[in-house]
Structures are given as C-alpha cells and as structure tokens.
Image (cartoon, grey):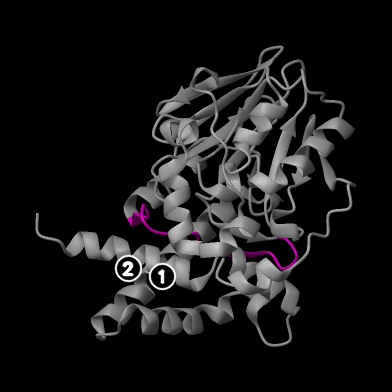
Amino acid sequence: MRDHKATSERKSSYTGVPDITDLGGDVFQIDTRMAGYQGITAGYLIRGSRPCLVETGTAPSAPVVRDALAKLGVGAADLATVVVTHIHLDHAGGVGDIAAMYPAADVVVHQKGARHLADPSRLMASARMVYGDALDVLFGTLAPVPADRIRTLDDVGTVDLGDGRRLDSHYSPGHARHHVGLIDSASGDLYVGDAAGVYIPETGDLRPATPPPDFDLEVALASLRKFEALGPSRLLFSHYGPVDDVGAILERSAEEITVWVDGTRRARAAGMDLDHAIAMVREQTLSRYAALREGADPTIAAKFERISGAATNVSGIWHWLDKLEQPA
C-alpha cells in the first residue's frame, strides 16, 4: 500500500448500502471498503446459532461492517465471535470498534497477537512511523479490546459456531508470526488471511504478500503445505474473495513466493541496494500479472499495487535475507 497520497485524498464511496455477497452455506462476504475503495479487503459472516465474523477490516470499516451485519439480521446482542487471522491493521484494525458495537462477542486471535489487541499502542506507533499522516485514512486507530473478552488460540484451536459446526484454527506463520488459517467444518471453506497471498478476482492474478518484519520463506511454504493437507473445498481470501481451484492456487502461491525470493536474491548478489532491488523485481515480475500489463484497467492495477506493493514485498524478503546473513 504505497500510494499514500492518492489514498489519503480519496473520499469514501460508501453510501450506507453494504456490499454483501451470499457465498452459500450461510457464509456471506462483506466488502469492508478499506479507505473507501471497493474490492480490497473482505470480511466474512458465518451466520447460524452463534454468528461469527471473520476479519473486521480497518477501524473506519467498522460502520460498514455493522450495517452489513444488520442487513443480514445480526444485531448488537447477536454476534457471538469475532475472529481475526492476524493483527495487521487491514484485517484487525476495526476489532476494538466492533467489540464495542457487539458487547456479547468474544474476540479470538492467535496468542502471539493478543497483547497488541489489548494494548495497541506499540502496534499503532510502528504503523505511524511507516505511514505517517496517511495512517488515519488508510487504517484509522485500532481501539483496545478489553482483555477479558480476548480468547487466544495456540497452534490449533476451535471456534464454536453452534449446532455442531466449528472453525478449526491452524497456525500458519510466514506472512506474520501471529497468523492463523481457519477451516469451516461444515462448508470446508478455508479462510487464508494473507498466508496464500493476494488474489485479484477481476483478472485471476495471485501475488505474494511478504512484508517485513516476519516473512520467512520456509515457514511460509510450510504453511501452504499445511493448507493443502487440510483438504479445503474453497479458499476465502481476505484480499479478495472465494476461489474454488484450491490445488492450483496453493501451488501458484508457493511459486509466486519463490519467484520473488529468487529475484530479490539475484538483486542482492548483483550488489544492488534495496531501492534498486525493488525496481528490478517489480519489472521482472510485471508480465506474470494481467492486472499490470500494458492496456490493463489502471484502477485494477492501482488496487493490486496498494494491497501487494512491490516495495513491501521486496522489503520483507530483504529483511529476512538480512537475518539469514547475521552471524549465529
């Protein structure tokens, strides 16, 4: 998400009419309208006797999500659980606001992210250093969640959806050390967060999500193998939407990560600094993505760069390579 100025100048297109897609099986995709843009970040409602929201989007997205839940028949006292795949602000930035709107809901997160939801001060300070004033429009401010409402997940865990249905949580770091994937026992849907990358439904493109400081190649690839072993029927991307061709997409995800790592390694071996490495890897990978080719819709290209920017991806790989080269 590099185009801070353009994003900060954009006015929200949200008109109070939520964008909801019925995915079947009492699962509903909600466009959380990050920074006013459509089709960047999705939340998902699993509706049942214990309604569950997977991903909140950013803090400014909270009213969007509230309106969507209301349209789906979920009132302030009805939501049972809010689960976030990880605590990055485009996924969990609205969790404090949503928790306040839905006082009966538990907030579920991997144990390595829990303290940052209870006290977001360090997380917000780090984000402010990266994004500056654009932070307010991009992500807003993560409000704290009362500690007694936070339920933590270990490497595996379960979220009760009611009537025998559950979400099974599987620790899947590599993108972030506090990341989990979630598989629905009834539908077979696997909520992949960012561990499988960023999917652009308009073009069918898939690009890796390898930001600093937690990216780790082998760990990321192991998470993808874990996802494959779970045998999901469908992948639900936070960025963005459902994908049915599970095996091919997971294979493509591993390939994309490897391509970007190999390109960054070549740039370092050639003696390039980070800025030149970013430019080189971006140029070398352009042809892989229909959204970025000449003649493509520029609005889709801009969206792709915002949610999986070359600078962020190469920087994360660069940081990981720096750690590998440090003396033991």
Q: Amino acid at mark 2?
A: Trp
* Tag shown at residue 318: 2
Tell me if mark 1 has few (under 14), some (14-19) or many (20+) residues whose alpha carbon lies within 10 angstroms of its own.
many
Q: Amino acid at mark 1?
A: Val
Residue 186: x and y, percent? 69, 25
Q: What's the distance in space between the residues labelled 1 and 2, CA to CA?
A: 6 Å
Q: Is residue 62 visible?
A: yes
Mark 1, residue position = 314
Tag count in the figure?
Answer: 2
Assess whether mark 2 and mark 1 are in contact (beta carbons under 8 angstroms).
Answer: yes
Residue 74: x and y, percent? 82, 25
151 vs 301: above or below: above
- Report the residue at 48% width, 65% height from top: 256
Magenta-drawn stretch contains 215: yes
259 vs 115: above or below: below
Magenta-drawn stretch contains 77: no
Q: Which of the 4 quarters of the picture holds residue 301?
A: bottom right
